[in-house]
Amino acid sequence: MDIEKLINELIEARGMTLTELTAQLGYQSKTSLVRIMKNQASQRALDTFARKVNERLSLSELEQEHLNEVLDYMRWQEDYDSSREMFRFLRGEVMEDADVWLEEVGAPRQELFRDRYWKATEIFIKILNCYNVPVFQCLRRFMRERGARIDHYLRMTRNPLHVIHASSVVVPLFHEKEYMCYSWHGGDGDVSSVRGVLNADVMVIQYRTEDGAALEDLITFDRKDHGYVLTGPRDGGFLRLLAIQQSDFSPIKRTFFLEPNLGNYVEYSRGFAQLEYNRSIYKIKPDVSIDWIPEDILEAALLEGGIPGIAENEELLNELRQVYHGRVHNTFEKRRVARTIMKRSAMLRFARTGRKSDHFWGMRPFTQEERVRILKTLLKQVESNPYFDVYFLKDNDLLRDGEIAYYENIGMLILDSNTSYALEDGHSEIMIEHKEFSRLFKEYFERSLLVSQVVPYSETIAFLNELIKIASGDS
């Protein structure tokens, strides 16, 4: 449906003329509506039209749905399909498993993918593409219950729809310790001329059967629900046949399997400081970011958090103080845009408990006094810093409960917000260095989320003041 058809249906359903609808919506003349109907209006004019329609007409549920669809299409146009895929990605929607049949080459026998390997042991899987093959929940179970290891190689093109879909499919596996993922030249190389096997959907699965036979399967998927399988001895022959050159791919998963000590935490924090330094950042995060917290509060929480021998290690503490100070100073003084969308439910929990959704395992919860200072610092920055903005979602359940951030000129960082950063437990982060993916995320952030999915500035200020009262025990 286009905007002209929508407006004509609104007129017809209410028995109005165009002139009468113009007056009902508060326009001076029908020229404004005619420009909108001919798709000649600015984005600001479209937003004003949507607000007037919602305020002054009693829309049916179907009319509201049509209005949202039309406005979304007009806002995105050639990026419409990609924007819909981005929304599904931000919501955390995953591709559900379906029946995928494997047919043995040269034999009529078929069996389900999940059944063929469920009783296998010593499973190692190398995947090329396959993001349209609905077996990723099954693969996750293989890792958790059968001890499988997976290396996944993605040929990410310049098409953002392709990249977002591929990312949506594999994100549920990213935080599994035995899953590694790589993209062709970091996801932004010129793959338009790539031919042959790198365009295919292929798996090589090495495994041991119930009776102890060591086998290797080469699976080529001709459809998302069907593949041909060729079986041979587990000698690496099919892996060599794929001829994947590791140097042609870059890891998009940053993985940390380090010992839980102060030195490793300092290095980890320094890495984040370098990522943030003097860059614009667009972030979706449930609650307070660590680079908003005064360094003396962070140090006190760390010193009393239970890391053995931390108080005696003055050299590392000094390094950490410098890192903390640099991160906070950079966030508030760098004169680069820093925009964060948060969840009110998570911030209420923080104000009451002093624990962030991603509270570092080595820190005690923040005290009542510390919480008040943190929230007052945040309020001051929102009110006075033209480069620093926070927003709260109208609907806490609209987006996935995780952290997704775009770092200017680098890419997208994705991690589980419900983490303690226990590095030895396999804490991992995903870095997708793909310009089109980053562009679309930033545009969706600004043109959709900030336009229609967050509360107004006045409500943001009121809510921050409410949080301060809660943290201080006054409410």
Image (spheres, rainbow, N blue to C red):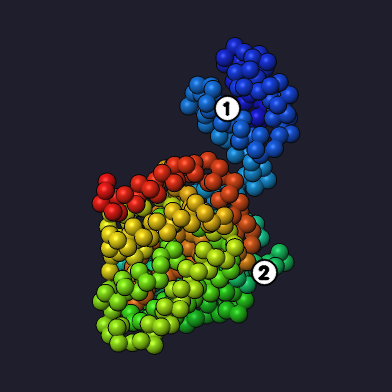
Image location of residue 258, percent across then percent down: 38, 80
**Alpha carbon distance from label 2 to label 1:** 45 Å
Q: Earlier in the sequence, mark 2 or mark 1?
A: 1
Query: Where is 8 relative to 159, above or below?
Result: above
Q: Residue at x 27, y 73 (%)?
A: 305
Quarter of the image with the N terminus in it: top right
Q: Is residue 13 left or right of residue 173?
A: right
Which numbered circle lies on residue 52? 1
Q: Is residue 133 left or right of residue 140?
A: right
**Number of marks in the rendered image:** 2
Image location of residue 280, percent across then percent down: 58, 62
Q: Is residue 459 left or right of residue 420?
A: right
Q: The disc labelled 1 sits on which kind of residue?
A: Lys
Callouts 2 and 1 close, C-beta under 8 Å? no
* Element under disc 1: helix
Q: Is residue 230 left or right of residue 395?
A: right
Which numbered circle lies on residue 35? none
* Element under disc 2: loop
Query: Where is 263 relative to 338, above or below?
Result: below
Of all residues, the one furthest to the top in this rendering is 15
Image location of residue 187, percent across then percent down: 61, 67
Please rate how many residues cluster around mark 1, counting C-alpha atoms within 10 Å: few if below 14, some from 14 to 19, many from 20. Answer: some
Q: Residue at x 59, y 46 (%)?
A: 447
Q: The disc labelled 2 sits on which kind of residue?
A: Gly
Residue position marked by numbered label 2 in the rendering: 189
Please rate how many residues cluster around mark 2, counting C-alpha atoms within 10 Å: few if below 14, some from 14 to 19, many from 20. Answer: some
Name the front one of labels 2 and 1: 1
Q: Nearer the viewer, residue 264 or 116?
A: 264
